[in-house]
Image: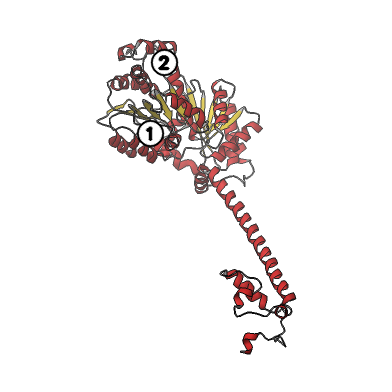
Amino acid sequence: MTDKQDDTPKTTFAALGLGPKLLQAIDEAGYDTPTPIQAEAIPHVLLGGDVTGIAQTGTGKTAAFVLPMIHRLEQGRARARMPRTLILAPTRELAAQVAENFEKYGKNLKLEMALLIGGVSFKEQEQKLMRGVDVLIATPGRLIDQFERGKILLTGVEILVIDEADRMLDMGFIPDIEKICALLPPRRQTLLFSATMPPEINKLAQRFQNQPKKIEVARQAQTAETIKQFVVKLSRDDDKAKRTALRRVIEAREVKNGIVFCNRKREVDVVTKSLIKHGFDAAAIHGDLPQAYRTQTLDRFRDGDLKLLVASDVAARGLDVPDVSHVFNYAPPPKDEDYVHRIGRTGRAGKKGESVTIVGPFDEKSWAGVVKMIQTDVEELMPEGLAEEIENLPEDTGGRKGGRGRSRGGRGSDDSRSGGRSRGGRSRSRAKDETTSDSKPAEAKDTESKTETKPAAKSDDKPAEKPRSDKPKSSRGGAKKGSGRDKKRGKDELAPASDAVRGFGDNVPDFLKR
C-alpha cells in the first residue's frame, strides 16, 4: 500500500466494503488509500469470485488478497487439522512476509494462523494444526510433507491463493500445485497473483479458476518510475573486475542500504567475502543457508543494522523492506523479467531509489534483452578512475570468463549444495567400496590359507585313523551337507599340501579294492 500522499487515488478502504475492525488496523498501519491493484481486486474477492491479478512488484498485491480474506474469515470457526484458507508462496521469505501482513491487519480479530515452511520444527507446526487454523500459509513442499504425514486435511479449504505464480513456475513448483489442487474441494474461491503472465501461468489459471476476473493495472515487466536506473559497462568479464567495479560503485553512490543480487549461490559467498574484506558491512542470503540464519540476516537488514545484503534471487520476490536506497546487479539476471523484480526492492511506496547493473562483454546479449523488455533508456555510469583500474588489474585465472562458462557455472550453482554433496557422496562411497573390496579379498586369502594348511597336516593320518565310508561327501573335512561352499572346501581338503603327486600307498580305501 502507499503512504499518505496528496496525489493518490481518492478511493478509500472504507468505500471498498471492509469491516470496521479491519479499517482500524489499516489506519494504525498508516494507510488511507488503496493502490490500483487493491482498489480493483478487493471488491471482487469480497463477492467470492475468482481473481487473476497482474501487477508489477511493490504495488501491494499481498494486501489485495489479505485484506478481503480477513474480512471474510471474521464469520465462521476453524476446525482441527482443517484450515479454512490456504495461501501458497514460492519461498520461505515470501510466506513469512504474508504471515506478517495477517498479523498486522488481523490483530483486532481472533484468527488463528499457521506458517508451514522448511527449517521450522514439525512439532510446533503440528500443534497449531491440531488446534485448528483459519489461515494456512505454506510453501508447496512442506505442505505436501505434512499432508502425507496425515497431519492436515484440505477438504475444508474455502479460499486458495497462489501468490507469485510466475515465480512458482520458475522454481518448478507447478507439479506440486497441481497435486495440492487435486486435494482441495472443487467448490472454492481461487485467487492467483503474479507480476507477469507467461503462457504456462495462463493455462494454470484456465485449469483451476472458474471464470476469473482478470485485473492488470500495469504493463507487464514495467519498472517503477521512482527508480533511477544505471548500467556500468566493463571491458573485461572476469570476477575480479566485477568485484572491483561493484566496490567502486558503492563508494561513489550515497548508499544508505542496498541489496546486491548475484546469479549464483557461489557468487553470493565470494562477493560477500570480498566486500567484508574491503571493510564493507555485508552479509549473504541464499537458499543453502539455514533458515534461522536467513531470518536473522533479513531482520538485521530491515532494522538498519546491516548495510549491504548480498542475495540470490531467493530474495528478489516478496522481500518487503520499505526503504532500500539501492539495488546492485552483479550481472544481468538469467531471465529478463527477473530484472524488474530485483530492482523493485527499491523505490517502494513512492520513495526514490537507484539501481546499478554491472555488464561485462559477455553480458551484452543478456543486457540487450533487458533493455528491450523494459523499453527504457538506462544511463551509463563509470566512476572516476574505474576504467583505468580495471585495465591494470591482473588476470583473474580462478574466476569465470566468457558467457558459456558462466552458463555452465550458473546451472551448477543452482544445485551447488546438492551437486557438491553428490560428488562428495560418490567419492566417499567409492572410497568405502574400495576399502571394503580390499578387506574382503584379504579375509578370503586368510580363509583359503587356513583351509589349505589345515588339511595338509591331516591328509596322511586321517584315513588311517578312520577308514572312509561309502559316503565320502559327508566325511570330507567335516563339511556340512548341502553347502556348495562346503563342497568346495571338501575338495580343497583332499588336495595335497605340495605340488608333488602322491598315491595312497598302503592306505588304499576299501571301496577301491572292491
Residue kind at label 2, given as amino acid type: Lys
Q: CA distance from mark 1 to mark 2?
A: 29 Å
Of the two numbered discs 1 and 2 on the same chain, state the one appearing first in sequence: 2
Circles 1 and 2 in contact, beta carbons < 8 Å = no
| Callout 2 crowding tier (Cα within 10 Å): few <14, some 14–19, many ≥20 | few
Which residue lies most toward the bottom here? 514
Across and down, in percent, residue 163 comes to 39, 30
Which residue lies most toward the left here? 211
Residue 437 occupies which quadrant of the picture? bottom right
Across and down, in percent, residue 365 comes to 44, 42
Give the residue pinned by disc 1.
Answer: 165
Question: Is residue 152 shown above or below 108?
Answer: below
Residue at the image point whose x is 63% and y is 35% from the top: 274
Relative placement, left or right, of 492 versus 178 is right
Residue at the image point whose x is 60% and y is 72% from the top: 487
Give the residue pinned by disc 2.
Answer: 110
Q: Quadrant of the N terminus?
A: top left
Relative placement, left or right, of 452 versus 97 is right
Give the SS element for disc 2. Answer: loop
Q: Nearer the viewer, residue 189 or 501?
A: 501
Across and down, in percent, residue 367 comes to 45, 38
Give the SS element for disc 1. Answer: helix
Residue at the image point whose x is 51% and y is 23% from the top: 324
